[in-house]
Amino acid sequence: EYLRKVEYIEKKDAVIYDEPDGEIIFENKTNSRLGFKVLEVNGEWIRVKKSERNSTNPFEKEGWMKWIENGKKVIGIISVVLI
């Protein structure tokens, strides 16, 4: 529930799948962090879409990425944005 309520999450070199353990539909190889909004959480997987706060994110669909790998969190959580 917490991840769905945060402002957005960031992931470096994000790999996004059509479903958990499915086919890759997007891969960021720019060595940069992209922002995503969490729509759903399913164990180690989160369903995401492009964050409105990160206009440089080229991902325009919805998909799944891992937020935990080998028992460690692999995303950055941005819970508040100051304007």
Image: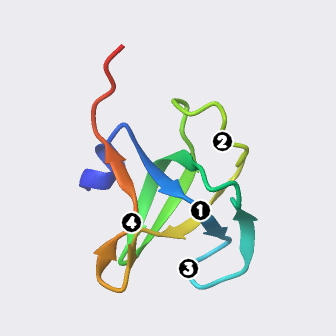
Residue at mark 1 to residue at mark 4: CA–CA distance: 16 Å
Q: Secondary structure at mark 2?
A: loop
Earlier along the polypeptide chain: callout 1 or callout 3? 1
Earlier along the polypeptide chain: callout 4 or callout 3? 3
Please report the residue visible at 30 percent of the width from the left and 44 percent of the height from the top.
5
Residue occupying the far top of the picture: 83
- Could you tell me residue 51's position as x and y percent? 54, 39
Query: Amino acid type of disc 1?
Result: Ala
Residue 71, numbered label? none
Residue at mark 1 to residue at mark 3: CA–CA distance: 14 Å
Please report the residue visible at 66 percent of the width from the left and 41 percent of the height from the top.
57
Earlier along the polypeptide chain: callout 1 or callout 4? 1
Please report the residue visible at 66 percent of the width from the left and 35 percent of the height from the top.
56
Question: In which image quadrant can residue 25 be found?
Answer: bottom right
Q: Secondary structure at mark 1?
A: loop
Query: Amino acid type of disc 4?
Result: Val
Earlier along the polypeptide chain: callout 2 or callout 3? 3
Earlier along the polypeptide chain: callout 1 or callout 2? 1
Residue at mark 4 to residue at mark 3: CA–CA distance: 11 Å
Residue at mark 4 to residue at mark 2: CA–CA distance: 21 Å
Residue at mark 2: 57
Residue at mark 3: 20
* Residue count near mark 2 (Cα–Cα under 10 Å), binned few <14, some 14–19, many ≥20: some
Asked if the residue at tag 2 contacts the one at tag 1, i.e. Cβ–Cβ closer than 8 Å, the answer is no
Query: Amino acid type of disc 3?
Result: Pro
Query: Amino acid type of disc 2?
Result: Asn
* Residue toward you, 17 or 58: 58
Earlier along the polypeptide chain: callout 4 or callout 2? 4
Asked if the residue at tag 3 contacts the one at tag 2, i.e. Cβ–Cβ closer than 8 Å, the answer is no
Residue at mark 1: 14
Residue 41, numbered label? 4
Which dot, 4 or 2, sits closer to the camera?
2
